[in-house]
Image (tube, rainbow, N blue to C red):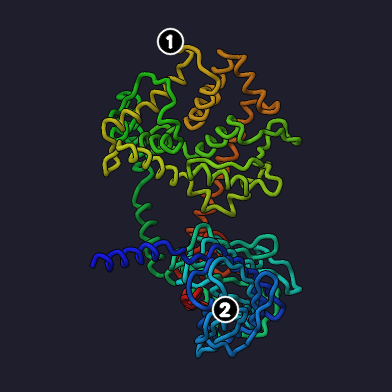
Amino acid sequence: MKKILILLFSLLLAALALPAQEIRNIDETVVIRPDGSAQITQIWDVNVVSGTEFYLPFDHLGPIEITDLRVSENGEEFVAEGDGWDTDRSREQKRGRCGIVRKKHGVELCWGQGDYGDHVWTVRYTVSGMVMKMGDYNGLYFSFVNPGLSAPPQHVKVMLVNETGGPDWTEENVKVWGFRSESEIFVEDGAVRAESLEPFRSSSAMTVLVRFDPDLLTPAVEYDKGFEDIIQLAFKGSDYKDKTTFGDVVVWILVILGLLLLTPVGWIILALIIFLVAAFNYHILGWKFNKKIFGARRIKGWYRDVPLKGSIPAGYYVLSKGDSMTDWGKDCSNRLIGAYFLRWVLAGVVEVLPDPENKNRVNLSFKQQTSFKEVLENDLYTMAREASGKNLILEAGELDKWSKKSFKRMSDLPSRAQTLGRKWFEDRHYTEKSDRLNKEGQEQARHLIEFKNFLEDFTLNKQRGAIEVTLWEDYLVFAELFGIADKVAKQFEKLYPTDFAKLSRALNGASLYTVMSYSNSISASALRNARVTKTWSDSGSSSSSSGSSSHRSYGGGGHFSSGGGHHSFGGSRGGGSR
């Protein structure tokens, strides 16, 4: 019995030690031709640990046909067997070969995996009827990546490329929507790009809906339903807005009637009461702070050390949760990104470059590849590098432009910072299950406000003593989060002119005040643009360019819907190794 148990335990350990199936990346290029057909090229970067073949199932094809499968690896073409693929062969018999299995309502594209381990396959096939004439428009509604693959892909990118010979694709003549994953989709540089924002889950898919104006191409296939029918089918259960219903009209009528019942005098009296109560609590009683967070509504005194171990998310969490009355509390999300930018500049991670076109502006070089312990800081730095383009220099307007396209990633930063800030307290056992901090946590939170008092009253504190330049750098970062960076910098310059000059010399001749103002303004603008775009996307507030008001989703691209996208052409489940 002992030997049997040892054997079973050894087998269990061996099973646990086996490498996991991986699909690291799927890069797909879809070349659209004048007749609506498409030549698809996929690059699969995978690690296989089991099975004899890799397969891609496509169902619900309707008038669509998939043909001409070709597969290659390391420049060597596989033997193409056409429609005669036999799935019951051994791994060795399938090695270096590919073929198609025809089913009643779809197909399976198959190829031999060969040896277990890493592979990068190039897969090509032709799809006739990818774009079809659908009533007054031409439409594409296709699932490019299935849910339920043998391993969820870590990254997916699909590019629709215009080789129709017709007009360029723009946001005006091409409308796009995406479904069933954390991804984004845009019309940009004359193409349509759909790309994942985070690793897929087993239920994730990449389903794309595109509407082309009729003059862009001439599809050979005409579908028996109009595009309006397709869009209603796709939108069912999605985050996109369906057409206005009778219930919507009733709700709006009730809201308007309710507003009419309130006289102007009533509005004025209600607003005056709210203002007087708030002013009395704030100015007379001094109740500025949330007692659940700080343990007190009034906080006086000074704290001279950098609070919360220098954690920007912890500071942001305390300010956003603890103070709902003052601007520096409720609006500190507008300064969150600026605080990180200033930290990088002062630490020398980001180089300041004079802007040749405007002396009151600077450019920021993100050429240094670096990593941070904090995941949010890492992600923000990566976003800034992406926004800075090929030269990795963040110039005027680049962060704004990037944030409009990647609004989900940018607009999520404050909520992510708040989550990390709460976790900072939880990890240190300062918080209860609710939002109320215990006594030790409240003391740490009060230190943040006491530190702000210290910075504001620094010149009045006779016991302040000398402060090192490196500590001033930390002071300025938190002062940026408070919204008093200019005031603190002026005190620094007045009391320690030599140290201030030394710090300024590291900025390549740019004024520290210019750097602070610029980093704050571009980050606040980027966050504002991302929020506006996200709100627009979520509400679907603009109608499509067709002038039709039947759907309020504007089709200008943005974040995928988590739901919807049902009954798409090619839509299936499964695939990968078997």
Considering depth in this image, is 190 or 143 the residue closer to the camera?
143
| Residue 499 horizontal/vertical position (percent) | 60, 17
Confirm whether residue 479 shows in the render: yes
Tell me the quadrant of the picture where the N terminus can be found: bottom left
Tell me the residue that label 2 is attached to. 112
Residue visible at 53% across and 44% down?
378
Residue visible at 42% across and 61% down?
17
Q: Quadrant of residue 311?
A: top left
Tell me the residue that label 1 is attached to. 463
Name the element at disc 1.
Answer: loop
Above/below status of 26 relative to 423 = below
The numbered dot on residue 24 is none
Mark 2 or 1: in front is 2
**Rounded to the nearest whole Å, what is the CA distance between mark 2 and mark 1?**
76 Å
Above/below status of 298 relative to 344 = above
Is 446 left or right of 417, judged from the image as shown?
left
Q: Quadrant of residue 460?
A: top left
Q: Quadrant of residue 72?
A: bottom right
Q: Residue furthest toward the top?
A: 462
| Residue 150 horizontal/vertical position (percent) | 47, 71
Amino acid type of the residue tagged 2 in the rendering: Gly
Amino acid type of the residue tagged 1 in the rendering: Gln
